[in-house]
Amino acid sequence: MLTLIGLGLNDEKDISIKGLEIVKNADIVYLENYTSSLQCSKQALDKFYGKEIQLLEREVLEDATAILSQAAYNNIVLLIVGDVFSATTHISLFQEAKQKGIEVKVVHNASVLNAIGITGLELYKFGKTTSIPFHKSETPYKVIKENFPLHTLCLLDLVPSENKFMEALEGIEKLKKAGFDTNTKVVVCAQLGSDNPTILYTEAKNVKLLNKFPQCLIIPGELHFMEKEMLESYKPKISV
C-alpha cells in the first residue's frame, strides 16, 4: 500500500490526526524534499512522528520504480509539504501506482493555493498559477498578462536540499527583465501557514530583501472594494 500524506505548511504538528496515525503504523516513511520546505527540521519530524524519515529527491521520485516495488509488499508513506497534489510528480505517482494495481490512499492538507486567502484576495478570482524559476524564462510574465484581470500567484523557485530559496525581490527582477512594470502593486508573502506570516502590499519597485522563507509573490488583477480594503491593511508602515 502507498499512502500520500499532506503535511500542511508550517511544522511537524500540522499533520492531521488521520495522517499521523498512518505514519506511526507505516513500514517505511519518505519525505519528498524538493517541491517545498517545512519550517522545522527533519529531526523534529522524526521525534514527533516516532519514525526515521527518509528524504527523497526529485530524480528518485520521478522514477518511482523502487518506491512502487516496496509498496507492493509493504505499507509505504510519502509525506508531502502542503497538499498531496500540489505538484504534477505526485499525480503521476498516484496514477502509476493505480496502473500497477497498488492500493493508494490520500490524506489532504492545507497548501499555498488556499493559504493565500489570508491576503483578502478572492480565491476564485485567481487565474493560472505560474512559477518563477532560477533560470531565465518568459513564461511567468506571459501568464500574468494572460490572466489579467484575474490575480496571479507566482511560486518562487527553491532547492531545499541546498537551502536555496528565491526571494520575492529576485522574482520581481526576473519579471522586470521580461517587461513587467515595477510600478505595479504586488503582494509579497512569506511563511504562509505559520503563526507569524509576513504579508506586504506595495509597488514592486519598493520590495526589498526579506530574509524569511518560503516566499511567494502575487500580482493582483482588478480588485473588488473588499479585496482592496484588506490589501490596504498589509501596506508596510515603514519603507520596505
Image (cartoon, grey):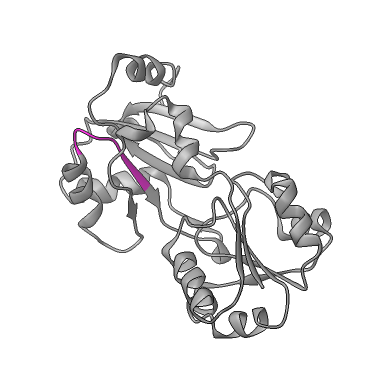
Image point (41%, 18%), residue name: 230
Q: Is residue 119 left or right of residue 131?
A: right
Instruction: Place residue 67 in its image quadrant.
Output: bottom right
Coordinates of residue 36 in the picture (x, y in percent): 53, 56
From the viewer's perspective, is residue 25 above or below residue 67? above
Pick the residue in front: 225 or 124: 124
Quadrant containing the N terminus is bottom right
Q: Residue 186 location, x and y as percent? A: 32, 32
Image coordinates for residue 156, horizontal then vertical, percent: 40, 51
Looking at the figure, which quarter contains the C terminus? top left
What residue do we see at 59% from left, 47% from top?
A: 109
Question: Residue 41 sits in which quadrant?
Answer: bottom right
Q: Residue at x 24, y 60 (%)?
A: 137
Query: Is 68 located above or below residue 91 in the figure?
Result: below
Q: Nearer the viewer, residue 158 or 224?
A: 224
Q: Which span of residues is magenta-colored?
A: 148-154
- Write down the quadrant of residue 69 in the picture: bottom right
170 or 74: nearer the viewer: 74
Residue 50 in the image, given as x and y percentages of width and height: 84, 60
Q: Is residue 173 left or right of residue 146?
A: right
